[in-house]
Structures are given as structure tokens and as C-alpha cells.
Amino acid sequence: MSQAGTVGRGLLARIAQGMYRRFAFTSQANMVAAASLVALLGGCLSLWLGQDSNWDLRNYHLYNGYAALQGRLHLDLAPAQMQSYFSPLLDVFQYLLLVRLPGPLVGFVMGVLHGLLFVPVAGVAWWVLRDRAERAWLAPLLGVAGLCMASVLSEFGNTMADNTTALFVVGSLWAVVHAQSRAEGVVPWRSWVLAGVLLGMAVALKLTNAIYAIGMAAALLAAGGRWSQRVLGLTVVAATALLVAALAAGWWYWQLWQHHGNPLLPQFNAWFQSPLAQQGGVADTRWLPRGLGEHVLWPLIFAANPKRVSEISLVQLVWPLLFVVGLALLGQHLLRRRRAHTAAAFAPVLRGVVAFVLVSYLLWQFIFSIHRYLSALELLAPLLLWCGWVRLWPGKRGPRSAGWLVAVCVIVSLVGRGDWGHESWASQAFRVQGPPMAAPAQSVVLLVGAEPQGWRVPLLPAQARYAAVASNFPEAEGYRAALAAMLDERPYQFAMLPGYSDRLALRFEALNRKVAAVGLHAEPGCGKLGWIARTVRGGRLKVEQQQGRCVLVPGKAGPMTPAAAEAEERTAAQARLGAYGLQLVPGSCVTLDSRIGQGRFPYQWCRLQPVR
């Protein structure tokens, strides 16, 4: 080996030793230092990603927090579409952050919050690896690996709630495995109560976390001493979780029941029969597997085609590997080839973690099959993959090869990272140009169509009333009657429609600034830039000379001009409004500016009149 190679390996060894001394879980101080570093890096990652602008934020996260604080349940009519009636508990917290603090500071805070996911994940690993010599350094590494999984990365620092509520879900599991690790005969009341509090908060903040409550029940029964103690633990956790969920979110469901006759409006309306919504159920079934074959092979299928379970590609390898390793372990058990003296040693609490993940995953697959709802499980996936592989290969090479397997999963997720939407930072996260509305207290504003527009409402006059039409809310006759009463009560009526921002042109402007920064714009013949354009697949780029400069332009014809696109939107709105006996006043529409960070989201503001 060359001298340079020897020096390089020595330097890496010294760095590894220094990291071990400072961040391995050999002392409480090291644990705090590791958690602090990961949280700080989480904040920095969120700053690097930019201002969150995901669809849910633009539709309901900002509006729901504002509406809950302002008591608008009886004033507005679903301006954030069907999502207007989701529990706003977490949205209140996020709204207060977003409107009261500078945008970059909010991003940093959310990144730190999501970085703290490291704590419960590493905590679960710490108890699972209790009998392993590698525990001190492996637990924090598996905690970091969990944060690098596809669904977790895609929502890092944003408001979509899956990462935020995963703090409570995995924290509850951490408390459960801590309770199960106590000595025989010791009743871990505090751990059980803490697990119930965290689980109840998770369900109160996001109802889809109910699947994890059932998974937690499986975890409690799968490990933890005598059966009587397991049942006692399940009883305490379940009772505490129900009480906390009722206290935290019950006020909201009670208000919905009082005002609209359905505490889960518009869902389960076949049972509650609120007059506002159609009587059928509301469920997004487009992501579910079809047929027995897909149900059996689903982890392989959605790994090969991520858009089977998500609007964006969340590329990952951990689920198919877990599937294969799980089948191999099942086969090993059924064939009785595993010998007791060669089996890898893991704490009994591993059974509880496996039960939690397996039951929760199966419920997810049959009920939702939406990838981002798996965040709590993906945080634990590297730990289970490592343990499963070592169980298959209990010799000296097993742990090392398992580490490489987890590292490959991390790399795949990092390289294929999906993004729900970000913009460049601005000190003020949200800005909306005020519309011409002379008498807000006598005005109704209709948000037309299914595009997300609810985020603007908190920045518009509070005296007006806002309602969605032709949205994703399953309107019934009661909805139309409530809307008609609203329109009869207020004589000034307006429509808000999506505007058009040529975001493709903006992206190419930014791209050509980078081209100019490295000097490729001035090359005679544009040869190097042309080579770069040709290497991009799909004909998405081509090179032109404009005023003596080499510039990149779209390889295919771009969308219509902003004016034409907005005219098309108005035509579509006319057709939708006709069903409500309304039409746009000719020539009344103006395009106004609104921004998230530095990203432009213009909107059209039009006067309304009855159809004549």
C-alpha cells in the first residue's frame, strides 16, 4: 500500500475514534451530544431545502390553524376543501410559527424538530441491541440511518405532519420497549402511562396514526414478561391513549358534531349522514394493491414503481430487502435449520418491535397504501433490516455485511430523494396582494376548483366569508343550501381562481444564470453546453444562441402563455359556476400577486353575478 493510502486510512481511523469518544452511547453526556448534533444538522438541512410549499400547506395546513384560532367553523364553508374539517391541533402550532416568525427561522425550527426523531429511534435500537457488543456505536448509527429513509427525507422540515407525529408514535414505542426491558416483577407504570400519552397525542394530531395504535397493542402483547403483565400494560396504555386523544382532539370533533352532524366530516358520512356531504364514504383507493398477487408482492412492486403509492417518486430499497429477509427468516424457522448456539443474540423486546412494524404495515397496506404514512415504520426499518440479516448470518461477517446493506439503503434514498415542494427563502413566508373588496363584511368569496387556494384566506379580510365550490368536497344538497343562504345574506360576491406563473421559464432563467457563472454562455459554437444538453435523457434540454450567448431552453414546446392559461382557467370556472347559478362578470377579473417564500403563486380575482 502506498504511503498516501496509509496516511489516509490512519486519518479516517482517528476521525472514527474521535467520533466514537464523543458520540457513541457510552455515557449520558455522549447521548445528549449525539442528539444535539443530529437536531442541529436537521435544522441546517431544512434551511438548505428552502421554504416549504407543499400542496397540503397551500390547501389546508395554514387555513385550518387560522380558522381554529379565529372560530370560523360557522362562518366559512370548506375553503380548504374536504380537508377543512381535519383536526387542526397540529395546524394551530404550525400556523403560529409560520405567521409570527421569519420564514427561515421556522424552517430551522421544523428541521430541528424532525432531527429529534433520532432520539426515540436510537432509543428503541438501544434496548433491542442490549446484549450486543456493538450497541454503543450501532444504536446512534441506526438512528441516523432511519432519518435517511425515503419518506422521512421527503418531508424533512415541512408541515405534512407524518414526520412530526412520528415523534409521538416512535416515542411511544420507545417507552413500551423500555417497560418491557424492566426486571421481572417490576410494574413499569410510568413507562406505560408515557407510552399512552404519546400514542394518544399521535392519534389526536393525525387520525391516520390509528393504525399504529393497533400495532402498539401487538407490540405490548408480543413481549414483556408474564401474560398477565402484558395484558395489564395493554390496558394502561390503551386507557391512557383514549383519554389523551379525547382531551386533545375531542373538542374539535364535538364542534363538528354540533355544527354539521358528523365529527369526522365528510368521512364516514354513510353512518353520520350530515346534510352537507354525500352519504357514501370518502376514501382514496387509487393507491391500494389490486389482486392477491399484488397484495403478496407489494413491497417489491412499489419499490420498482414508487408512484404506485405516492404522487412523487420516493425511491427506496429497504422495504423489498425487509420483505426478502423476512421470508428467509420464516423459511429458516419453518425448516428448523437455525441452531440455538449459533443464533444471534437480541433482547426479547425485538419481538415487540417486529410485531409493531408487521401489524402496522399490514394495516397500512390494506387501508391506505400511501407511502408517506409509513414514516414511523421507515424510521425503524434500518434497525429491523440489520437485526434480520444478522439473524440469518450470525457469524463474524454478518454484522459487517448487515451494515453495508443498511448503508446501501441510505444511499439509494439519498440519491432518489423526493420533494413535495420548496421555494427560495424570504423573510416573510407568505404574502398576498390585497384584492379590491370595498365592503368585506358584506362579501362572500368563492374559491373555485380543486387547486389549493386555502392558504391565502388567512391573509385576506377576516370580515368576509369564504367557501369552496366544485372542489374535492363531496357536496350534497345541504351544502348547496348553506351556500345559497350565504350568498343571499351578502350582496357582494367574488370568485378566486388560480393564476398562472410560468415556473418553467423561471427555472430556466435560474439555470442559465448558473451557465453564465461558469462561463459556458460565451463559448463559440456552444459545444460543451450542447454536450451537457444531449446527455440529459428525454430531450428535456436543447441549446440556442440568443444575442451571441449560449442558453439552455426547453427541449419541447412549453405550456401556453400566462394570459392564455388564465383565460382557460376562467372558461373552466364559468362552467363550474353555472351549476350554482353564478357567472363571472365579464371584464372584471384581475390577476394579483401572492407568494410563498420567493415563489410566485398568482391568483385571479373576479366579481360574480347571477346567471341571466
Image (cartoon, rainbow, N blue to C red):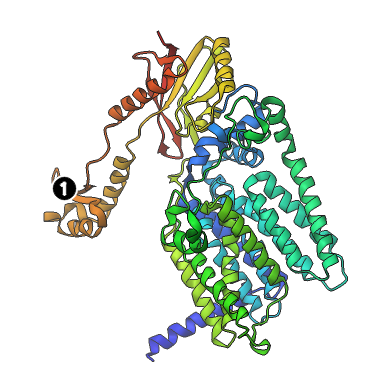
Above or below residue 470? Residue 232 is below
Q: Mark 1 belongs to which amino acid?
A: Glu
Could you tell me residue 331's position as x and y percent?
A: 57, 77
Mark 1 Cα shell of 10 Å, populated few (<14), some (14-19), many (≥20): some
Q: Secondary structure at mark 1?
A: strand
Residue with the most extreme left position: 525
Q: In the rendered image, which quarter is residue 189 located in?
A: bottom right
Q: How many marks?
A: 1
Q: Image check: 185 left or right of 397? A: right
Name the foreground residue: 277 vs 542: 277
Check disc 1 and report the residue beneath it.
544
Where does residue 283 sit, x and y in percent of width and height? Answer: 55, 41
x then y, percent, for residue 390:
58, 80
Compare residues 564 and 349 and report the one nearer the observer: 349
Q: Residue at x 28, y 44 (%)?
A: 509
Q: Quick check: 267 left or right of 433?
A: right
Residue 484 image position (x, y, % from top left): 55, 15
* Whether residue 438 is visible: no
Query: Could one spot residue 128 in this view of the protein?
Result: yes
Q: Quadrant of residue 359?
A: bottom right
Q: Is residue 311 above or below residue 449?
A: below
For the residue pair 261 and 146, the one nearer the viewer reads as: 261
Residue found 68% across the figure and 30% down from its top: 256
> Which residue is most to the front?
292
Name the quadrant of the N terminus.
Answer: bottom left
Identify the image quadrant of residue 576.
Answer: top left
216 vs 583, left or right, is: right
Image quarter in which the C terminus is found: top left
Residue 117 vertical placement versus 242 (above, below): below
